[in-house]
């Protein structure tokens, strides 16, 4: 799942993303509006996949100060 700072949310199955070699300019998942940026990328496990431990996604990174 990708989220932009403009509120756009898109879910894309991994199988839907093509493989590109190092010689290419990358793969476009979706286009953002002028000045809009992707601010979050998260893997959403399918039912039955091994998920991260409960609360792991909510824990701040060690170098991020808590407010």
Image (cartoon, grey):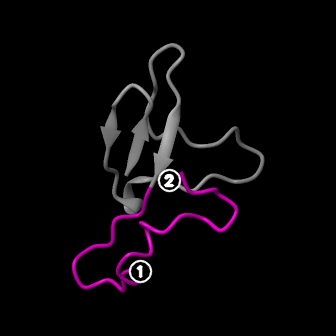
**In the drawing, does residue 25 fall left or right of residue 36?**
right
To which quarter of the image does residue 7 belong?
Answer: top left
Name the outermost residue toward the top: 34
Magenta segment's dominant SS is loop
Residue 37 — which label?
A: none
Residue positioned 48% across, 69% down in the render: 59
Residue positioned 76% across, 52% down in the render: 22
Residue 18 — which label?
A: 2
Magenta residue check for 53: yes
Q: Tell me if residue 56 comes above or below residue 9 in the rendering.
A: below
Q: Position of residue 2 (x, y in %)?
A: 41, 45
In the image, 7 versus 27, the foreground residue is 7
Q: Position of residue 23 (x, y in %)?
A: 77, 46
**Dot 2: few (<14), some (14–19), or many (≥20) neighbours within 10 Å?**
few
Q: Secondary structure at mark 2?
A: loop
Residue 52 — which label?
A: 1
Q: Position of residue 45 (x, y in %)?
A: 33, 72
**In the drawing, does residue 35 fall left or right of residue 32?**
right
In the image, 43 versus 19, the foreground residue is 43
Q: Earlier in the sequence, mark 1 or mark 2?
A: 2
**Dot 1: few (<14), some (14–19), or many (≥20) neighbours within 10 Å?**
few
Q: Which residues are magenta?
A: 42-67
């Amino acid at each position: 799942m990708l989220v932009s700072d403009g509120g756009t949310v898109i879910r894309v199955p991994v199988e839907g993303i093509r493989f590109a070699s190092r010689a290419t300019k990358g793969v476009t998942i979706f286009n953002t509006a002028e000045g809009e940026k992707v601010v979050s990328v998260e893997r959403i496990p399918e039912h039955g996949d091994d998920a991260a431990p409960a609360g792991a996604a909510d824990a701040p990174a060690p170098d991020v100060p808590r407010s």
